[in-house]
Image: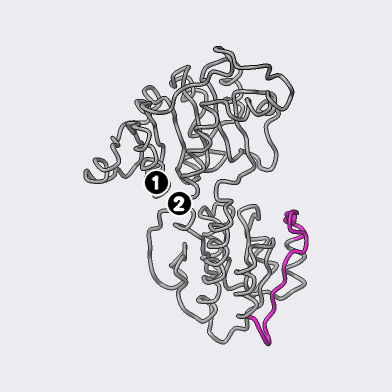
Amino acid sequence: MPSHADTIRVLMTQLVPEKAVVRLEEAVRGEGVLDINPEQDRIWTKAELIDKLKAGDYNVLYCMLTNPIDAEVMDAAPDLKIIANVAVGYNNVDVAEATRRGIAVTNTPGVLTDTTADFAFALLMAVARRIVEADRFLRAGKFHGWGPMMMMGQDVHGKTLGIIGFGRIGRAVARRASGFDMPVLYYDRAPADPDTEKALNARSVPMEELLEWSDYVTIHTDYNPETHHLIGKPELERMKPTAYLVNTSRGACVDEAALVNALKNNIIAGAALDVFEREPQINPGLLELDNVVIVPHIASASLETRTEMALMAANNIIVAMRGERPPNIVNPEVYGQQQQTDNR
């Protein structure tokens, strides 16, 4: 467990907004160390990260969801006290192994809820109204005047929205749907209370019913072995041929090969994806299709939200290194406590 006697020696795997860097610089001023990957847009390989950790005698790892942190990585930093992950999800970190070693693991929940919900709805609108496709059409010089059959998409208002995962982000999406008069069906292992359902015009249903009745299906569950390929060939075939799938959670919640097949064969009308099964690799089939909107994992990428995420991670570090329990701990067992965390 972190001790107040520890000097803070931080390795940051990618540059984050300036306010968080300044916060950490102030924390390490004097005897401490803050080393940052100088190549802002390049992700260190696992081998490079191990080499950096071995060379620096770091006790703090400030990392991103693109950094796999397993036992081998932890071995490279025997003095490691905290792994501060700049993300809501933390499936990139072997939390059980960190807990066994007494290393605190933290995340950045809550702050990106509304920004991610905004973006999920933006993707929904973009794919339904063919906005990206129409932009390419116009730039290619194909627009020769208005036509009654040109670029027809589908309405959003009044349609049924199916939400898989009704945590913070799922409920924020439901609030936005109310502005479009959309009834909401949702699937979650822990249904909301009746007052919440009434306020959000939402009804809990089995997954099969959600898929069969929804015009738009949006995924907001966390990623774990149970949600791996949560949407695959059988689920896609249950959806309406006029339905759309939106994913801003984790790429591996969707079987991409099955999705490509469904999009090619008009099993569903379209999809909009912010996340991918094998990031940064993209299934080549997705790149060939016009009925899918694909963007590079940017749902939380507003200046305000990314700054708050980075500051939250920095604050987790500073609190932990004072010997106190950080506010966003995901393995409170290292402090002799138990806690349930909603990370959706």
Local SS, label 2: helix
- Comparing 29 with 321, the one in front is 29
Q: Main secondary structure of the magenta part?
A: loop
The image's colour scheme reads one colour
Q: In the rendering, at what x and y percent does residue 295 appear?
A: 63, 39
Q: How many marks?
A: 2
| Residue 156 magenta-highlighted | no
Residue occupying image coordinates x 67% and y 62%: 73
Q: Residues within 10 Å of mark 1 (few under 14, many from 20)?
A: some
Highlighted magenta segment, given as a residue range: 28-48
Q: In the rendering, at what x and y percent does residue 83 appear?
A: 58, 66
Local SS, label 1: helix
Q: In the rendering, at what x and y percent does residue 276 appear?
A: 61, 38
- Comparing 96 with 228, the one in front is 228
Residue type at the position of mark 2: Thr
Residue 113 circle label: 2
Residue occupying image coordinates x 43% and y 67%: 332
Rendered position, 41 above or below 197: below
Residue type at the position of mark 1: Ala
Q: Which residue is mark 1?
A: 172
Is residue 41 left or right of 302 when viewed as pictured?
A: right
